[in-house]
Amino acid sequence: MRLLDIALLVSAGFAGGTVNAIAGGATFFTFPAMLAAGVPPVAANASNTVALFPASLAASVALRRELATVRPHLPRLLTVGLAGGIAGAVLLLATSDRAFMALVPWLLLLATLIFAFSPQLLAWVRAHRGADTIIFRPSAGTLVLIAVCAVYGGYFGAGVGIMMMAGLALAGLEDLQVANALKNLLAGAINGIAVVVFVASGVVVWPAALVMLAGAVLGGVLGARIARRIPKLVFRWLVIAIGSLLTVWYFLRP
């Protein structure tokens, strides 16, 4: 790899790790950087997942205490999440680079809209949830929604956390700390099983993935310190602006 590519991947990993620790949205930084470094689209997405996986795993481990109240439901939720993650990863590997690049602007648009309107989405879900949905019960509908999120997470993943938070709120999980912990656990499981599929397939570009991983870990460690100095809203608007610009760019590029 060229020195410029290494600098780009480390910087994107650092930016992604930082915003993930504060507001989410790392993929908006890391996936385009993989493409800019010359990694083919499908391999770029797989390598990007590998690079960001330790951060999602660390987040789920750090919040494991909050999962005590939903522990009886974890086997079903994790089974659905793992199955969906495998399906999404296999679907990605079955997609050609050309077809995936045609989907990228639409995937980025979806992720940007989900991220931008996440407060309104979650508020709407809570306001329109049935009055009888007081106790968290992962119904068949909830499991289907988690499965859809898991397939999307294994395939691309940007914005999947917000989608799962909305689904959990719809199922009656009012406690935001518990919902966030459960979301992190499911995201970690989905990313983890996708990583296994990608590594087994040999599609991961390891030099790029490891260089970006180093930047992401550093960004995750420093993210909390940076958060004390910069309002979270600033990071949200930064991610939305970058997501919007990238969406337009990939729609217009040849």
Image (cartoon, helix red, strand yellow):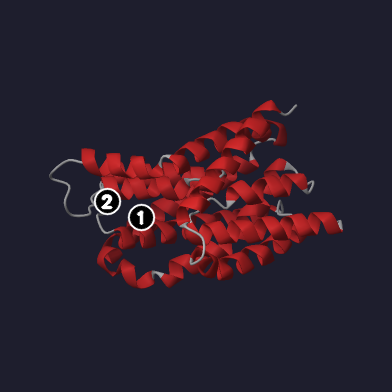
State the residue at coordinates (24%, 55%).
Answer: 174
Depth order, front residue of 107/229: 229
Say whether residue 103 is left or right of residue 161: right
Point out which mark residue 129 bears.
none
Q: Which residue is drawn at 63% across and 31% down?
A: 248
Label 2, label 1: how far apart the Cα atoms are? 8 Å
Left or right of 72, for residue 230: right
- Residue indicated by mark 2: 138
Q: Which of the marked residues, 2 or 1, is nearer the chain's N terminus?
A: 1
Residue 18 percent coordinates (x, y): 57, 61
Q: Which amino acid does label 1 sit on?
A: Leu
Residue 101 higher or lower than 166, as above or below: above
Residue visible at 53% across and 70% down?
Answer: 225
Res 144 visible: no
Residue indicated by mark 1? 77
The image quarter containing residue 61 is: bottom left
Which corner quadrant holds the C terminus? top right
Q: Residue at (61%, 42%) from the top-left corner? A: 92
Q: Mark 1: few, some, or many residues within 10 Å (few <14, many ≥20)?
A: some
Residue in the foreground of this view, choosing between 136 and 198: 136
Q: Say which element carries label 2.
A: loop
Are the residues flagged by discs 2 and 1 in contact, CB closer than 8 Å? Answer: yes
Mark 2 neighbour density, 10 Å: few (under 14) some (14–19) many (20 or more): many
Q: Is mark 1 on a helix, strand or loop?
A: helix
Relative vertical location of residue 29 with respect to residue 251 in this rendering, above or below: below
Q: Quadrant of the N terminus?
A: bottom right
x, y percentage for residue 169? 28, 49
Q: Pinpoint residue 160: horizontal percent, then vertical percent.
A: 46, 47
Is residue 211 left or right of 22 when viewed as pictured? Answer: right
Residue 42 at least partly seen: yes
Amino acid type for the residue under numbered disc 2: Pro
